[in-house]
Structures are given as C-alpha cells and as structure tokens.
Amino acid sequence: MNREHWGSRFGFIMAAAGSAIGLGNVWRFPYVAGENGGGAFLLIYLAIIAVFGFSLAMTEIALGRATQRNPVGAFRQLGGRLWTPAGYLGVIAGFVILSFYCVVAGWTLAYIGFMARGLLGSTDPAVLGQSFEAFIGDPWIPLYYAAGFMALVVLVVSSGVGRGIERANKWLMPALFLLLLILLIRAVTLPGAGEGLRFLLMPDFSKVSGATFGAALAQAFFSLSLGMGCLLTYGSYLSRSTRIPTTTATVVGLDLLASLMAGMIVLPVVFSFGFDPSSGPGLTFVTLPAIFASMPGGAIFGVMFFLLLAIAALTSAISILEPAVAYFVDEYGYTRRRTVSICALVCLALAVPSSLSFGHWSGLKILDRSFFDLMDYTATNLMLPLGALLTSLFVGWRWAAGARREIFEGTGIAGIWISVWLLVLRFVAPAGLVWIFLASSGLL
Ligand code: PFF
C-alpha cells in the first residue's frame, strides 16, 4: 500500500509544531519557569533545547523517514525484534497520555463557554477556586467535554494525514500564533507588566539547584513531544527531499517562541494584578479568570485565552493518537476510520477514572497518587524519558551511520556538528535521562 505523505514542507512544519505546542507551553511553562528562577531557568532551558532537544528531535524524525513505518515497525526494521519494545512503549504511552490530556483539554473547552457566558464574573480567586473544584468534581459534565474534545480529535485523525492532520494544523497553528500575539500585546501594555517580564527574564541564580536542571530537561522533552514516537510517526510521512536539520530547527524554534510568548502573557498579567505566580497548575483555571474579570475587555481576552489553550491541546492530541493509529493501520491493515474510533474509545474509557479522581473517586489512591496523577506521572516521568533513552541508545550505538546519512547527507553541515550530535546521542542524552529518571523517582 502506498504511504500517504505531507503535501508540503510547510504542512509538516505546522503539524510537528502543532504536536510540540500544547498545554505544556501555555499552561505548564510559565509557572515552571516562575518557580525555578525565571531567567536562570530560561538560560538552562535554552541550552538543553539547543543541544539535547534538537538532536533527539532530528533523530526521531530520521527514524521515521528512513523506515516509512510506525514506531514498532521502524524499530523492528532497523534493530530486529529485540528493539520492538521501544516502539510499543510509544504506542502505549500515547493511550496513557491522551487519557489525562483529554480531561484537561475538556476543561479548556468548558471554560471557553463559561467565559463567553460571563459565568466567571468573580474577581475573587477563592470563589473561582470553588467553582473550578465543583466543576471538575462533577461526575458527568467534565466527561461530556472530554468526549466532545475526543470527537474533534477523531474527526481530524480519521480524515487522514493530508486531508485531516495537515489541513487542520495549517489553519489552526497560524490562528494560534495570532491569538498569542493579540494576548501578548494586551498583557505587556497592562500597568505593572514590567514586573512580570522581569520575573521571567531576569536570572535569579539563587533558585538554581540540581532539581532545576531536571525540571528543565523534563519540560524540554515533554514540550517537544519526544520519547513516544510522535515525531517518528510524523517523520514517516515525510519525503526524501526535505532537509531534516533546518526543518527540525524551525519546529524547535516555533515551540520555543510559543513558550516564551505564553510566559510573557501569563506572568505580566499575574503581576499586574498582584497575584502570586507560583500558584502552580491552578494558575490557568483560577487565577487567570479572576484577572480577566477585573480587566477592561477581560471577557473577550478570556475567551481568546481558553480558545488558544483548546487549539494548542487539539493539535497535540491529534499527534498523540497518530502513532497508535499508524501502528494498527500499518501492521494489521485495519482501516484508518475504524482504528481511530476504537483507539479514541479506549482513551475515553481510561479518561473516566482520571476525571472521577477529582470528585467521586478522590479518596482512591494508587501508590499514593490519584488515578489522574498516576497516569500523568507514569507517562511524563517514566515512559517518555525511557522512550527517549532507548531511542538515543539505539541510534547512537546501533544505527549511527544510517541516521547520519539520513540527517546530514547533502546538507553541507560541518563534521564537527555531526560529532557533537553523535556525542549527545551516545553519552549526554543517556546520562541526562538516567539522571531525571532517578531524580524523579526519588532515588537521587
Ligand atoms: N508537546 C505537548 C505539549 O507541550 O503539551 C504534549 C505532548 C504531545 C507530549 C505529544 C508528548 C507527545 F508525544
């Protein structure tokens, strides 16, 4: 069967950037940067992205393009049966991630409506905190929204690579950047915004510790969608004529830009109204609505902000589902439409306990964590680093010559950079990943 390909390089860049730019950029980055020393964190993050993120992203794309397969097929073709678990890990991680990602994405859809209908009119975070808890604790309503969100994902992914994924991203990503730009202009022109910008950009090295590096590393590869075969699968729809280094650099640059813009929106807004930037995950759903309610034109900016989050989540969710879909379509010859619906239903079934863990089942703890936290932790802290570790070891030690040809041939890139790339794959990335692995499991 002929494999479908992206219609253009632009289409691939939008799709890969759509995967990378998600809740991780808009919801997570601002407060992680805020908690870890602002500009100091940013410097470390930039270095990690440039060296580690960029090398690994190129490598994943090369694995996909060279084999034209899904993650399992790609590892089997190049490494034999021994390496297929690296591919399966990605397929399974997709289900785990999407099961909690769609719950949060559902909240963002709901909040677009709440904002538009003026239901979040209070300027008191305590009141908004209560209504947020009441909403996410409801047994049914958040699940309806999660199901609605999954229906959108199904609609896009089942239409195929070109007519579905590429077309959606080609419209949604420019829209996302437009929303980011409008919100950025609004945020930096608020009185007192300078304080927030200073907080984000001025390095405070007293807050830097070993944990900062771990946080930056984890944020970098979650943000770049590394370690679960997303970029590998998207790379498998890429044609030979595309240059991997420059294309990857564009995607990584866009991801970084989106994170910076999100930070420059959220933090000035928070500072301008005198709130605490380290209020963590609740920042988005509790603090920001309070601020929008007290800001001139806040309702409209609030709608835009949650629309931005929903778009970011949608384009990422599409890419999280695709490796599993590609696996079943490639390996078993199932039709795309049927596969997509079944995979989405499995994710949704797993989303039920995740969503209920904020309400009816909040007392249920597995290994000391709620079901939602367990899924998040297993995927983000264990499966993704492990996937990235196996990928860098495999390519660094077993497929280095092939990857080198796939990525650098005909690009005119100097040999020294190629040596750096190989050094990163063989030593720097594995050491860094083992370190976050140990640090996040409390062993270090
Ligand atoms: N990169 C996405 C974000 O920043 O929200 C999340 C993500 C997508 C993680 C795809 C992993 C993945 F494979």
Image (cartoon, rainbow, N blue to C red):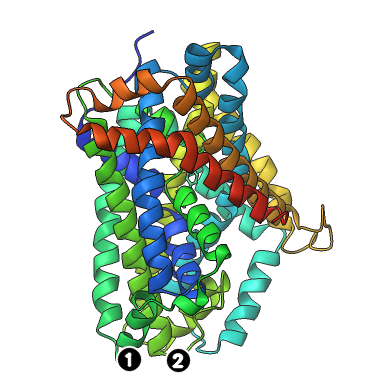
Question: Residue at 29% of width from left, 65% of height from top?
Answer: 180
The residue type indicated by label 1 comes to Gly
- Horizontal relation, residue 176 to residue 219: left or right: left
Tell me if residue 407 comes above or below residue 291 in the rendering: above
One can see residue 416 in this view: yes
Q: Which residue is nearer to you in this view: 142 or 25?
A: 25
For the residue carrying disc 1, how many other residues have a C-alpha within 10 Å: few (<14), some (14-19), or many (20+)?
some
Distance (Cα) linking label 1 and label 2: 9 Å
Where does label 2 land, which residue?
274
Residue 149, position as x, y percentages in the image: 51, 49
Instruction: Give the SS element for disc 1.
Output: loop
Q: How many marks?
A: 2
Look at the numbered disc 1 and say if its residue's Cβ is closer than 8 Å to ligand 1: no
Task: List the single residue furthest toward the top.
Answer: 1
Is the residue 42 above or below the residue 56 in the image? below
**Residue occupying image coordinates x 70% and y 66%:** 137
Q: Quadrant of residue 418?
A: top left
Q: Which mark is residue 192?
A: 1
Front position in the image: 402 or 426 = 426
Question: Which amino acid type corresponds to the residue marked 2 in the rendered image?
Answer: Gly
